[in-house]
Amino acid sequence: MYDILSGLSVIEVSSFVASPTAGLYCAQFGADVVRVDQIGGGQDFRRWPVTARGDSLSWENLNRAKRSLALDFTRPEGRELLTRLVQSVGNLITNLPVGGFMAHERLAAGRADLITVRVMGWPDGAIALDYTANAAVGFPALTGPLESNAPVNHVLPAWDLLTGAYAAFAMVSAVRRREHTGLGGEVRLPLTDIAMGSAANLGRVAEVLYTGKDRERLGNGVFGTIGRDFVTHDGVRVMIVAINERQWQGLARALDLGEALASIEAALGISFTGDDGVRFTHREAIYRLIERSAAALTHAQLAARLDAAGVTHGPYKTMPEAIADPRLVGENPMFAVTDNNPSGFAYPAAGPFATIPQLERQPPAPAPLIGEHSERVLADHLQLSSGEIARLIDTGIVGTPA
C-alpha cells in the first residue's frame, strides 16, 4: 500500500476480474475505494478457487484494501441510495451495462462532472469475456504445440488484467482532466478493443496486412530471435533467450558454439553476426546445436555458464515451485503474510507491484467482509444519521456482516 492517491474516493460496482482489478490498483495506491455489492455478495463472491468452507480466494485478493457497502439492488430504494452515493463521490468504476440503472447520462444528471470508467465486452454493448475476446483476436491460433493446429487458449486472463490496469489509468487521467477543466465524462473500455489494440501496438495488425498471412505457430519459440525451451542432462526444462547481439555472442561463447556456427555460415553463405533476422530464419540449425550442448550439461552447469555470459534463462516451474522461490515470494517485499483475511486462511498476499524507494510500503490490507463498512460509508458520503442508517438496515435495504 502507498498513499499517492490519498484524498481520491471511488465507487466500484463490479464483478469478476477486470473491473475489480481497476479498483484494486487504485486502492493499493491509497484511494478510498468502496466496493458496492448486492447483500450477500455478487455473482463473483463464490468464484473459484475457494476454501473448504466456500470462501473465494479470488474475491479475497481482488478486493484487498477496499471498503464494502452492501445494498439490495432489487429494490428501488437500494438503487436510489447507490445513485446518490455515486453522485456524492463523483467517481465510478463499473462493468454494469451502458444502458442500465448505472448509465452515465442518468447519473450525470445529478452531477455534471461525474467520471465513469466502464469496462465492457464489445463497443456496441454485446457481451464478451476475456476468453472470447482472446479467441476473437487470433492469439490462440499461434499458441500450443507445433504438432497440433487446434487453437489453444492462454490460462492467464491477460485482457482482463490489462483492461483493469488501463481502467485505473483512465480514472486517474480523467480526474486530472477534471481538476484542470471542471469536466467529467464517461470512459468506455471494451475488452475486445483492449485485445485488438494491444495486438496492433505489438505490430501484429500491420504485420498481417503487410505479409497477407498469419504468423506461423512456434510452440515455445520466441518470434524474431533465438529463444526456446531446452532440456538439460538432469531433465530440467529451461527457457533460453538471446534477445540482442550481446546475449547472442554470450550464448555462443557459453556453449562453445563458435566452430559449429561458422560451419553453418560457410555452408549457407550467411553471417549470424549482427542480424537477429538471419539467426531466426535459420533457427532450427542453431537450436540443434543448443539442444546438444544443453543435453550434455546439468542445469546447474548450464545456468553457471549462461550467467557468466550474461544470457537470459530460467527453468520452467510449477506454481508451488514458484511460491517456494524466495526471490518471487518469501524475500520479495511486495509480499507480506496476512492473517486477517475473511477466509481465515493466513498466507503471503501481494501489495502494489511497484517499488517506490522514496515511500514506505505498507503491508497488504485485507479484503472486507460484505457490508463491513456500510454504516461508515453512508455516514461519510451521504451524511445519513445513525437513525436513518438503522432504519435502512432493519428494512433490508442496507446489509451488514452476518
Image (spheres, rainbow, N blue to C red):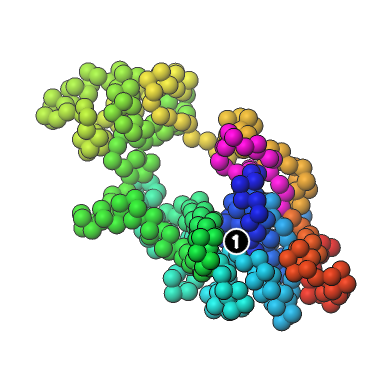
> Is 390 covered by the magenta stretch?
no
The quadrant in which residue 87 appears is bottom right
Q: Residue furthest bottom?
A: 76
For the image, the number of numbered tags is 1
> Is 366 covered by the magenta stretch?
yes
Q: Quadrant of the C terminus?
A: bottom right
93 horizontally vs 88: left or right:
left
Q: Which residue is mark 1?
A: 16
The answer to whether residue 231 is seen in the rendering is no
152 horizontally vs 87: left or right:
left
Toward the viewer: 74 or 293?
Answer: 74
The quadrant in which residue 368 appears is bottom right
Q: Is residue 141 above or below residue 331?
A: below
Residue at 59% from the left image edge and 79% from the top image edge: 109
Element type at mark 1: loop
Toward the viewer: 42 or 178?
Answer: 178
Q: Is residue 250 above or below residue 86?
A: above
Q: Main secondary structure of the magenta part?
A: loop
Give residue 258's position: percent from left, percent from top: 24, 19
Q: From which residue to which does the magenta span run? A: 350-367
Give residue 42's position: percent from left, percent from top: 68, 66
Give residue 215's position: percent from left, percent from top: 28, 51
Residue at 75% from the left image edge and 48% from the top image edge: 341
Toward the viewer: 180 or 74?
Answer: 180
The answer to whether residue 138 is seen in the rendering is yes
